[in-house]
Amino acid sequence: MALLQIAEPGLSAAPHQHRNAIGIDLGTTNSLVATVRSGAAIVLPDLDGNCLLPSVVRYRDEAGQTVVGHAALAAISRDPINTIASVKRLMGRGLKDIDEANALPYRFIDAPGMAQLQTRAGVKSPVEVSAEILRVLKARAEASLTGDLLGAVITVPAYFDDAQRQATKDAAQLAGLNVLRLLNEPTAAAIAYGLDNAAEGIYVVYDLGGGTFDVSVLRLAKGVFEVLATSGDSALGGDDFDHRVYCWALEEAGLSGLSPSDARLLHGASRQAKEALSEHMQTRLAAELSDGLLVDLALERDTFRDITRNLVQKTLLPVKKALRDAGIGVSDVKGVVMVGGATRMPQIQQAVAELFGQAPLNNLDPDKVVALGAAIQANLLAGNKQDDEWLLLDVIPLSLGIETMGGLTEKIIPRNSTIPVARAQEFTTFKDGQTAMSIHVLQGERELVSDCRSLARFTLRGIPPMVAGAARIRITFQVDADGLLSVSAREQTSGVAASIEVKPSYGLSDDDISRMLSDSLSHVHDDIEARKRREAQVNAQSLIEATRSAMDADGDLLSADERTGIDAALAACAQTAAGDNTRDINEAVSRLNQVTEAFAARRMDRNIQRALKGQKIGEL
Amino acid sequence: MNPDFQQSHFALFGLPERFALDGAALDAAWRAVAAEVHPDRYAHAGDAEKRVALMMATRVNEAYRTLKSPLSRARYLLALAGTDTQEDTNTAMPADFLMQQMEWREAIEEATRAREAARLERLAAELGAEARTLEGQLGDALDTARDLPHAAALVRKLRFLEKLGQEIDDALELALS
């Protein structure tokens, strides 16, 4: 094998070659896509120059043709049942979890795990609707980038639970995006803010979006963004302020029982009035209903403040909780970064200023900062060399636990644990000869199972029959860097290691994804097989490059035998990648992965030793 | 397969194996090591490296968590020395300690019922001071006297205090909402 250039450990073999990666802010109201170009993060506009894509999807016909964005938004009161807005509020949620379901004009279908929507193009899950938005953003990015798109960082509210995260990842996969990471929105904002301002110290990010509220407390020090605590409310946002104005308008105008179209129309007018009051002390709320009735009301800023007072208060509670969990007081906070369009409301600015005793930081565009931060993170994850190197240490927002006797929850991983994190717990059998066991995984802080989010129920089978209490079943809960949970179990005493992997029940299986993919692609004449083959080839190529550069850098860690084994796997990988059999390529890739695992572990070990030494020199 | 996973948490961070700990040094070492193994550094790597990075980063975070809290650090040192802390089995406590426990528990219950955040905060501060005293004694028992049974008894006491602290936290959260 020819000698190659030596690359930085963990970096690509060809550092000069820019890898395209994007950051996507998949918002309740608007979505954006950004990338890093010539060292600067920029939001990518559409052909008309609009950066914001309204997160609205309209199913135009029975064949499933969609329009997304401004055109869909324009049709919302004309075609409310087939035009889906704020779908983010439905992600990973069962019908009973959606408080406002009755107020929404959609035809809901209750389905296990997640509510579905009946549209003229058939039943659609929120995952499919979100994938439509992501597809448009992906196409927008591809049109402006040269070369293949390596992958995307997609932001989620920090307070999203496992079901909501998994649904978001599924949507990205459905849209054909390689997800480099799910990134918490306030953390993304902190990256953009922190790097831009060389900030050091304790910062709070107050992120009030269209439908979700997050607050994160971070310590920024020497290129490390460490989330100390996060809290929030995944069903509280600017939409709720619109709704208060809408309810006020109904009462003032003496209206009730509006048609879905009129309701949409009046909601739109309410939103405009809310936005106008960020600039003016008074505004008019006007709409002409379908029966010709003219609603025309004057709304004062003070009235708006009064009718939304408890919503503002509702955001302060998670702020106090996050500060408590982080173990800090308001006087320790160096700055409060405001994120999300809804933070433009004067009453929000005022409440935050009062609580912290300092003016909040508004020097970033609250609509764009999350997408920009995601793009910067995507650029780093893609392995592009950049001026700033930093490390992100994030946490899980909600405790994970299991159901024990009497409908109670036992916490296994507490909230605000730094991810990735794993915890193992041992269980035993209750009866003689018991060969199966049911496990119910929950997320939330409450003591009662019924107050927590049910993530998965699974049954462990194949436990060797023993007397009660003799079996030792070790269940491991692993939360990865995306904040996603996987559970595995193993019987310890028998030596017969019955091991299982659990995919939570609300997640889509690979078959579901394939089916949805073929459904959605059938009308655009895309060849899924060709796409899968291309992905496999790109994947193989990048693994070959990475392996070769690793061997150049740390080849001394390998024995001659190991080197021969890896060389053979490399050659097989290169050979299959040149052909067009997708399955062969994937098998060769997985073999190469297998034979390099021990090598990878030794290299990381060496890097750790190097890092500790470097740090001690730095301390002297 | 992996020698690194048998290393002690202290060795992982290049720190001396004792109870007295320089918190800033632990923080700095954690950050340095975490930076090397964090999955973000391997997001574009092959599956093998991703898998190893996830395992290593998980292990590093677990080690940090264990060493950071004095109670779990003491428990870990005792485990390394082969001493069982008997937290679930040995409930024998000195009478005066038990009396104080009962008084605290009553005070917490009262303050919780009254939803008095300030009183709860005061109780938390009192508990914290008591915990610091016990931690000082733990340092002596583990690092100087090497009296492991005494250290185990102190761990059991601290465990009691931790549970009380948790009750105060829960009550405070309730008082906040």
Image (tube, coloured by chain):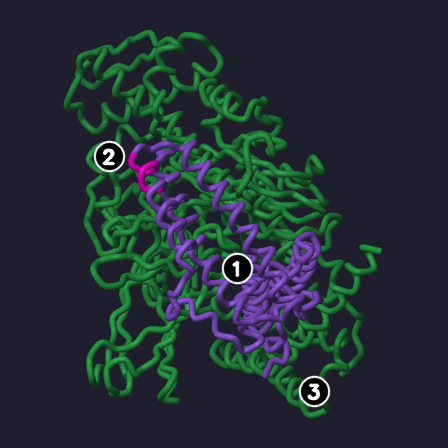
Chain colours: A green, B purple
Determine the secondary structure under disc 1: helix
Determine the secondary structure under disc 3: helix
Chain-order first, disc 3 or disc 2: 2
Nearer-the-camera pick, A479 or A620: A620
Which chain is home to disc 1? B
Distance from the alpha carbon under mark 1 to that under mark 2: 51 Å
Q: Are discs 3 and 2 less than 8 Å apart at CB?
A: no
Instruction: Determine crowd level at label 3: few under 14, some 14-19, many 20+ residues with C-alpha closer than 10 A.
Output: some
Name the main secondary structure of what is drawn in magenta: helix
| Residue at image point 19% right, 48% down | A109
Three-letter amino acid code of the residue under disc 3: Arg
**Would you place residue B112 above or below residue A354 in this image?**
below
Instruction: Determine crowd level at label 1: few under 14, some 14-19, many 20+ residues with C-alpha closer than 10 A.
Output: many
**Would you place residue A357 above or below residue A141 in this image?**
above
Identify the residue under disc 2. A104
| Residue at image point 42% right, 60% down | B94
Residue A249 position, x and y percent, is 26, 15
Q: Are marks 1 and 3 on the same chain?
A: no
Q: Is residue B85 magenta?
A: no
Identify the residue under disc 3. A563
Q: Are marks 1 and 2 on the same chain?
A: no
Q: Are discs 1 and 3 less than 8 Å apart at CB?
A: no
Residue A399 position, x and y percent, is 40, 53
